Amino acid sequence: QVQLVESGGGLVQAGGSLRLSCAASGFTWGINTRAWYRQVPGKQRELVAQDVLGATIIYADSVKGRFTMSRDDPKDEFYLQMSGLKPEDTGVYYCNVIKEFTRNQYWGQGTQVNVSS
């Protein structure tokens, strides 16, 4: 089992920045994919950024150039640096990991991000 805990959400004005963190614990061996998703009421959860084996990071078109995903393997943490925030970035942000061999995936509890105009 893997436990994920997000932190760093909050309220920020448009144009501002936030840094989300995701701390993984438990049996983290074998994780090969790390990702951030977000969800707003009435809409499906959408992929924001995804890191596969540290070799490739993909970003949703809506956040390219504004968001940066990074990781700190010794700490078993990964991050989402969000800059140039827009009101449409408002939502609950979830971190997600997938294990390479079992394909089991795990989710954090979510952290709320509110961007005011």
Image: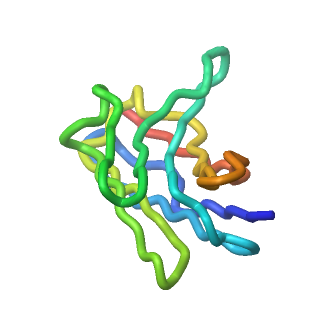
Q: Residue furthest bottom?
A: 74
Q: In which quadrant of the rendered image does the C terminus lie?
A: top left
Residue visible at 58% across and 61% down? 31
- Residue 95 rendering spot, x and y as whole percentages: 58, 51
Q: In which quadrant of the rendered image does the N terminus lie?
A: bottom right
Q: Nearer the viewer, residue 40 or 47?
A: 47
- Residue 66 rendering spot, x and y as whole percentages: 24, 43
Whether 45 is drawn above or below 65: the answer is above
Position of residue 102 in the picture relative to residue 84 (left or right): right
Residue visible at 42% across and 33% down? 89
- Residue 12 rendering spot, x and y as whole percentages: 41, 49
Whether 42 is drawn above or below 22: the answer is above
Answer with the quarter of the image where residue 80 lies: bottom left
Q: Residue furthest top?
A: 42
Residue visible at 64% across and 71% down? 29
Q: Nearer the viewer, residue 8 or 27?
A: 27
Position of residue 96 in the picture relative to residue 47 (left or right): right
- In this figure, what is the number of numbered marks? 0
Residue visible at 53% across and 55% down? 9
Position of residue 20 in the picture relative to residue 17 (left or right): right
- Residue 44 rendering spot, x and y as whole percentages: 62, 20
Colouring convention used in this rendered image of the protein? rainbow
Q: Residue furthest front?
A: 101
Q: Residue furthest right?
A: 1
Answer with the quarter of the image where residue 3 lies: bottom right
